[in-house]
Amino acid sequence: MEKKKNLPAVVWWMRRQTMKVKVLLVASLMVACLVALKLTVKNHAYFFVASELSHAVGLLVLGYKLIRQRTCSGLSLKTQELTAIFLVARFISSTITEKNIHTVLDLTTLASTAWVIYMMRVKLKATYAKDLDNFPIYYVVVPSIVLAVLVHPYVPNARHIEILFAFCVYAEALSVLPQLRLMQNMKMIEPFTAHYVFALGVARFMAWAHWIIQTIDTRGAYFYMIGSGSLWFPAIFLAEVVQSFILVDFCYYYIKSIMGGQLVMTMPV
């Protein structure tokens, strides 16, 4: 009872609202964040940097869990392997076409992800819930390859890089599905796992904000930057939206748990 008394008044007010009001408030908050980002961030490349840094923060949280708690319970090895796959694809394409800060961040994130996979497969494999991590990887890899072959950007004299980059975009959009499936199977979500997935949600929001703001600034022309009627930008935008919607449900229950002072998070089936 004492714990409930210590909760902020805004939490009690939110709990009394209907679901429609809560959804409206969350949507309004997201719009407010987009407006604030549009007014304060002049270089749109910073959105992707922020997205990659948020992913890195999530990996730091995982590192703390693996080193200090000596357990990988609640973590999906398949999500980490999918992450490594699309990071390899993105690093190769970035190395050939750009060689900038994104290349460095991708390499750092890839190395960290490889370390997490090593810890889960070798050092802490006794704590890995393999039977609950049952989402087939090919459900993500195969459709991503097909889409990449059919819809990709245009880079002169570098068709293989076009397909490689498109694959990493599509695979990234779906890579969190095994982790969400595992958490659903476990019913209970440990704090550090929840923090990691929320960091992925923030990363997706920053990437999604980039596309929204770029589209607004160009009055829709950003969709067709590469050739008249090109499907690539609508496709990549749709991939960002899909991943955002995949994570938004989790983020809602995460914030709800944090505001309620719960250490262990639960999600409905």
Image (cartoon, rainbow, N blue to C red):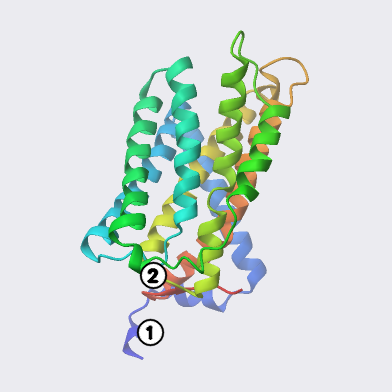
Is residue 140 in sight in this rendering? Answer: yes
Farthest residue, direction right: 229
Total labels drawn: 2
Tag 1 residue: 4
Compared to residue 142, the image places residue 66 above or below, namely below
Q: Which dot marks residue 196?
A: none
Horizontal and vertical percent for residue 229? 78, 20
Quarter of the rendering occupied by the N terminus:
bottom left
Is residue 42 in sight in this rendering? Answer: no
Determine whether the residue tagged by mark 1 lies in a helix, strand or loop.
helix
User: Of marks 1 and 2, which one's residue comes earlier in the chain?
Assistant: 1
Given residues 153 and 198, the one toward you in this image is 153
- Residue at the (38%, 38%) spot, across then down: 110
Given residues 108 and 9, the one toward you in this image is 108
Compared to residue 128, the image places residue 119 above or below, namely above
Q: Which amino acid, by three-letter code, is at mark 1?
A: Lys
Horizontal and vertical percent for residue 226? 67, 16
Tag 2 residue: 190
Residue count near mark 1 (Cα–Cα under 10 Å), binned few <14, some 14–19, many ≥20: few
- Residue at the (42%, 75%) spot, across then down: 260
